[in-house]
Image (tube, rainbow, N blue to C red):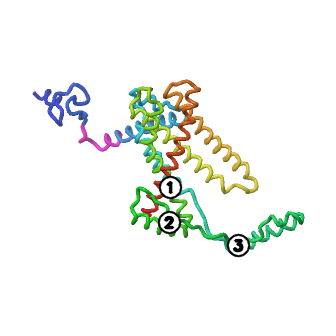
């Protein structure tokens, strides 16, 4: 009797035939045990998650289309799920973009105006007489930034919301640095907004591929996670080497940093093309045509999402 009791599920009293109950799914695990056993399990879970995470990152960054193919073919346990991976990388991207990108937009000081005037005078003096009239001689600051809706009608906003947007636009015009930084920080949210529409477009352009919408959404999640990861790396490298530009003895580091960021951007476009080829397994010419069409549609979606996110961001500021 005691033996049979020990082989019953503690949650539903069903007889166990393995580590998990076939009726309710609860694991046959003893949670009331020594603290040393709990700590050991904790480090084991962390190590297991770490191995999945690094395996996922390696596949995401170096092997276009690989993670999406693995997921749709049912191999899930070895990798971080697509949605969780996207949210994790978007969180990192948000923190990097809001903390590292420093935007300093300010009106010109008298010293700035004097310096510009001096440069213009030097340029004027070095030009032949017939060319001197082509150089603008005034260094006065231009008209302040004006952001206004005027008679523009935004379909999804009520009249009261349009008035509120107009007021906040004028407030942000007085602080363009805050406005620009807010837009940059909204990049992850903007890409998240695009995801379902982008997956729907992939479903349409590969209509005869007999794939479910969720398969296209998986590709969209992985490619957007890769794009955010690449943009994050480019931002980190650019911000790290920018103080070295013009510094004697360190220009070579800035040059290498520029080369690396250029390679990342090139790899981004190559990666997306290879992903389409590998996942959808169509010919190279057909993939190239669909890649170009996808690029144009993606730009339109990006622009629309950007405008919507900016309006939402301003209204919530």
The residue tagged with tag 3: helix, strand or loop? loop
Residue under circle 1? 185
Report whether residue 63 is seen: no
In the image, 221: left or right of 287?
A: left
In the image, 170: left or right of 107?
A: left
Whole-percent x and y of residue 223? 50, 38
Q: As rendered, which of 290 and 16 lies closer to the eye?
A: 290
Instruction: Return the mark for residue 167.
Output: none
User: Crowding at label 1, few (<14), some or many (≥20) Cα neighbours within 10 Å?
Assistant: some
Specify start and end residues of the magenta stretch as a single range: 30-40
Where is residue 41, by image quadrant?
A: top left
Is there a contact, CB below 8 Å, between mark 2 and mark 1?
no
Q: How many numbered marks does the figure carry?
A: 3
Residue most extreme to the bottom: 110
Residue at the image point whose x is 51% and y is 25% from the top: 281
The answer to whether residue 38 is magenta is: yes
């Amino acid at each position: 009797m005691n033996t049979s009791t020990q082989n019953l599920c503690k949650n539903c009293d069903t007889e166990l035939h393995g580590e998990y109950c076939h009726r309710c799914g609860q694991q046959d695990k003893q949670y009331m045990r020594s603290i040393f056993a709990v700590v050991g399990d904790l480090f084991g879970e962390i190590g297991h998650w770490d191995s999945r995470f690094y395996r996922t990152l390696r596949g995401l960054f170096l092997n276009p289309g690989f993670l999406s193919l693995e997921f749709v073919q049912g191999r899930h346990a070895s990798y971080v799920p697509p949605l969780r991976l996207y949210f994790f990388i978007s969180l990192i991207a948000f923190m990097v973009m809001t903390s590292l990108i420093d935007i300093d937009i300010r009106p010109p000081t008298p010293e700035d105006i004097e310096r510009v005037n001096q440069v213009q005078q030097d340029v004027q003096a070095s030009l032949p007489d017939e060319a001197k009239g082509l150089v603008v001689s005034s260094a006065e600051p231009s008209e302040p930034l004006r952001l206004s809706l005027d008679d523009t009608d935004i379909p999804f906003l009520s009249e009261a919301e349009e008035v509120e947007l107009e007021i906040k636009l004028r407030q942000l015009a007085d602080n363009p640095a805050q406005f620009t930084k807010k837009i940059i920080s909204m990049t992850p949210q903007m890409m998240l907004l695009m995801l379902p529409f982008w997956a729907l477009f992939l479903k349409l352009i590969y209509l005869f591929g007999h794939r479910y919408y969720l398969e296209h959404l998986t590709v969209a999640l992985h490619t957007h996670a890769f794009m955010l990861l690449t943009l994050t790396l480019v931002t980190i490298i650019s911000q790290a080497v920018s103080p070295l530009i013009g510094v004697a003895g360190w220009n070579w580091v800035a040059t290498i940093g520029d080369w690396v960021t250029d390679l990342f951007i090139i790899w981004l476009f190559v990666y997306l093309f290879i992903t389409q080829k590998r996942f959808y397994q169509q010919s190279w010419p057909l993939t190239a045509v669909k890649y170009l069409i996808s690029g144009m549609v993606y730009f339109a979606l990006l622009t629309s999402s950007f405008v919507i996110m900016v309006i939402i961001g301003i209204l919530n500021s």
